[in-house]
Amino acid sequence: MVGLLASTWRKAIARALSGGGADMIAPANRPAIQTLTGRPIVRLGLATALLGAALGASSLTLVPAAPAQHAPAGPVRSYAWVQSGAPVQDENFYLLTLLTRLPEYRAAILVSPRLNRIKADRAQRIAAALTSCGAESAKCRIDAMLWQPQEIDAIGDALASDPRIAGIAARHLRPSGAFQLHAAKDDAGLLRAAWVDAAAAMNRIYRVYGLAEAPRYPKIDSGDFKPDDPAFGRLLAEGMDIAARGTPDDAPVFAAPLQFALMLLYLNDRELVRVSAPLEKQENAAAAARVAHTDWSRYPYTSILVLGSGPGALGTGISNIGKLRTMRAAQLYREGKAPFLIVSGGAVHPVHTDLTEAMGMKRELVERYGIPASAVLIEPQARHTTTNFRNAARLIFRYGLPMDRPAIVTSSASHITSVVADSFRQRLDAELGYQPITRGRQLGPYEMEWHALPAALHRDATDPLDP
């Protein structure tokens, strides 16, 4: 009997794999991967395996009949994102958007004695600290606003232990994919980790765009103000007062700190993520609509990723290096390598430019080379090579390009040499904390194969300009 069940299980898993079910395996689950039928799968219990066989095992992420603390459900392409009307907030602080925009969670937070006590204690601490701040001291005010470790822990415990909020993990955190690195945790642990990320993101903004701490790439990501500048101190004092006046007394404990962080990005002209939302209804609409009707068997690759190269002067649409990269990308497209091009690059060079590398490359491909606009997907947020790949992997997942098939990337010869090298894998770990892609063969001086991984969906709390 056991042998028959094992055989049935193997056949069910094989069907799931052939149908693309393996695409949904969360990176956090990969340590549990074992080999069965010669293919990698997630280790499942016998009861879940039997259920999968009975249902045809259309996906390996099967939900058990009884609620489980370790929910196996992973990212869902069709997940409906909740929007606050403030794209910068939604991109950087999606958990807080959920907690404030969805009535059931907001109501639970507002009546929570623990959270209200934390809010009162924090307000008292900040008020006491601000009494000693001079009228022109920006540093004193920002130091007072920083989330303290004990506050972060206390809020995390309060959220994770509230049964009225518990459902947020299965309904939103897991299917969104935005917290993918925490997917192996139980629901309470996932919620707690998501809050810790949000608090860390606020503190990161305070430090970089208020206290002038160096970001990862200071030349392009630094703020405009110095904490010892009296003019900034006066500006900040007035900004804090205006922000406080716009925050209701009964707002959640994190509302005022969140508005302060968003205000710092606004004052430093660093609201860069708002330029890309929502792409699927604007620049990428035509291409995204074509995905479902594409015959993938006609192409060796799903897409051609083109890495951006920013112009060196304001008002310049595309650099000479970018021109050569788009020329090679057009050649690959005309050779039938893939049905789509993904042009990736944000508003990076020069600092404070309004032009994105992605839009400059798309215009070049469409207007100069006659590539159909419906064949070009833009990714206008990436500021570094690591996020070029990560953000392109997100588009591949969200728009439904097959993740079990390879993509190709093209760039300058020296650039491809750098991404093929082992040091690029180390750079991904250092900057992102995980691997959003797997690299394949180098095909020539200007191309490399690669695969997108679901881990790329995780939002990066340390980079508010491109989370």
Image: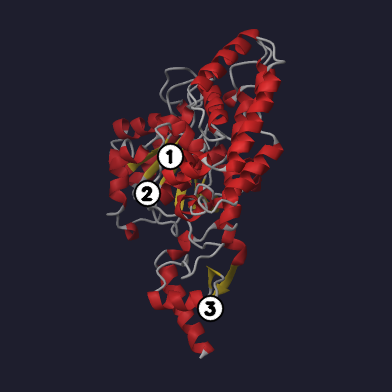
Question: Is disc 1 placed on a helix, strand or loop?
Answer: helix
Earlier-in-chain disc, 1 versus 2: 1
Position of 343 with respect to 281 (left or right) is right
Three-letter amino acid code at disc 3?
Answer: Leu
What is the distance, in whole Å, between disc 1 and disc 2 at their CAs? 25 Å
Label 1: how many Cα within 10 Å (few below 14, some 14–19, many 20+): few
Percent position of residue 179, x then y:
54, 48
Instruction: Please name which of the two marks, 2 or 3, marks the residue nearer to the observer.
Output: 3
Find residue 299 and report its image quarter.
bottom left
For residue 101, the mark is 1
Question: Is disc 2 placed on a helix, strand or loop?
Answer: loop
Find residue 56 and report its image quarter.
bottom left
Q: Is residue 155 visible?
A: yes
Earlier-in-chain disc, 2 versus 3: 3
Question: Is disc 3 placed on a helix, strand or loop?
Answer: helix
Percent position of residue 413, x then y:
53, 39
Label 3: how many Cα within 10 Å (few below 14, some 14–19, many 20+): few
Three-letter amino acid code at disc 1?
Answer: Arg
Q: Which residue is mark 2?
A: 399
User: Looking at the picture, does residue 428 appear above or below residue 58?
Assistant: above
Percent position of residue 303, x then y:
40, 48
Percent position of residue 376, x then y:
34, 40
Label 2: how many Cα within 10 Å (few below 14, some 14–19, many 20+): some
What is the distance, in whole Å, between disc 3 and disc 1 at their CAs? 40 Å
For residue 46, the mark is 3
Three-letter amino acid code at disc 2?
Answer: Tyr
The residue shown at (50%, 32%) is: 250
The answer to which of 352 and 107 lies nearer the viewer is 107
Instruction: Please name which of the two marks, 1 or 2, marks the residue nearer to the observer.
Output: 1
User: Looking at the picture, does residue 53 appear above or below residue 134?
Assistant: below
Disc 3 and disc 1 in contact, CB within 8 angstroms: no
